[in-house]
Image (cartoon, rainbow, N blue to C red):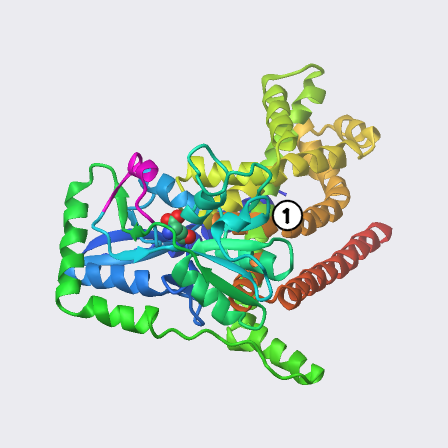
Amino acid sequence: MKKRFRLVLSLLVLCLLFSLTGCGKSESNTTNKTLLVGTNAEFPPFEYINNDGVEDGFDIALIKAIGNEMGYDVTIKNMEFKSLIASITTGGLDASIAGMTITEDRKQSVDFSDAYYTATQYIIVPINSKITSLSDLNGKDIAVQEGTTGDFLATPADDNEVITDSTTNVKRFKKGTDAVLELKNGGVDAVVIDANPAQEFVKANKESLKYIVEDTSTEEYAIAVKQGNTALLADLNEGLARVKANGTFDQLVGTYINGTSTTDATTSTNPFVKFVDKLDRVFVQTNGYMRLLNGLGITISISLLAVLLGVALGFVLALMKLSEIVTGKKTIFSRIANIYIDIIRGTPSMVQLLIMYMVVFHNRFGFIAAVLTFGINSSAYVAEIIRAGILAVDNGQMEGGRSLGFSYGETMRYIVMPQAIKNILPALGNEFITLIKETAIVGYIAIQDLTKASDFIISRTYEAFYPLIAIAIIYYILIKILTKLLNLFERRLRKGDIH
Ligand code: GLN
């Protein structure tokens, strides 16, 4: 047992080290400074994930050009729009570029560079909608991207002069594409969003949606940095001025804003052709299948590492709890273990994940944060599995061992544990299966797991059906295979018993 335990531990440490070096790498060289820039790559044409799966768009190209000009190695970090400012204030990011409008509220938390783009808000509605202006949205259902200026414009509030009807229902989504999908599926009457993304979204859905040019006040996009970081701000402004002066800026406007092309929806009426076209669009054209495969790899690695960590921690916890039985009264160890298990089992894993990622890791090392969260979470359940497994071994075994002259530890090691393992292993296998399904929430901390891969495809193609069914099938097959393997393993163990 000891050997196996050591093996598991060293494997875990190795894997963690491996992912640490993989996740935390920032190629710095001696001349360039590094610049970690956050964005929310769901806002075409300013930022989106391109077909190769990397962040692209006007903002991304702009910040890279500025970095190039000023001697910075720019690393892009894709995250939720509403987390950008918090990440800058906590130091998790050096800056953000995300089509972010300068607002008085935001200025309380971050400093903005010179503005680089002027925008307005548009309204997207179904093609046959009667809505023609912002004030028509009073009392309607509106979808927006959470925490954006579109959200502020659509939400009834004291300082909102247009939307005054308090029955107006605003549905907030993490991504503009999700808001558009909601509109497409009939869940809302309109979407309020910045002009350029609105045009992109309508272009990709021109058979069903249209936009209304609303004469809202203009907004200025700028790069945000931590308050008081004047050196960086000066560099960014200088870089911006230079790329404007040397023509790069206009070139980028030409490439990304005036000349973008989105995959057009199929126009054929033949249902079979339509079906094949859709499959092609969803899984091939956008490299969807690659996203799914990569996502599957990430889901499996997080679950596997977490279950290993869970077993290691769970074993220690189980021993701590069992100390109560050995001594016949509550010990400091059993008390600590009980509190730990109580807290872990009493809080949602989603909340644990967010605390680990945002509070403990300051929005960095998402992969490690996920492994630790699920490992710790699982350990509370594993502890019970191991404890119950050990207690299920007949007491006579212990008595027998002791009467043969073995010490308590020896009896545990040579007589009780080998039998307990047979009770424990199948339950641990089930724990692994549960974990695989539970990790589907890691997309919340921007990890591209299997579930998140479907998200990517949906936001590129506006098709929810195929990608979601596809990941459901993949999870199902994965779990079926594991269950089969487990059953086989269990049968083996039982055979060992008979011999
Ligand atoms: N310009 C809007 C804002 O700053 C939307 C930005 C975005 O969604 N990326 O709120």
- Residue shown at 75% from the left, 48% from the top: 426
Q: Is residue 254 above or below residue 149?
A: below
The quarter of the picture where residue 318 lies is: top right
Q: Position of residue 198 (x, y in %)?
A: 45, 61
Secondary structure under badge 1? Answer: helix
Q: Position of residue 216 (x, y in %)?
A: 38, 51
The stretch in magenta equals 101-112
Whether residue 172 can be seen here = no
- Quadrant (top left, top right, bottom left, bottom right) of the N terminus: top right
- Amino acid type at circle 1 is Glu
Viewer-proximal residue among 52 and 133: 133
Residue 172 in the figure: left or right of residue 341: left
- Residue shown at 45% from the left, 32% from the top: 158
Q: Does ligand 1 reach within 8 Å of label 1's beta carbon?
A: no
Residue 105 part of the magenta segment: yes
Viewer-proximal residue among 310 and 186: 186
The quarter of the picture where residue 5 lies is: top right
Q: Which residue is mark 1?
A: 438
Q: Position of residue 207 (x, y in %)?
A: 57, 73
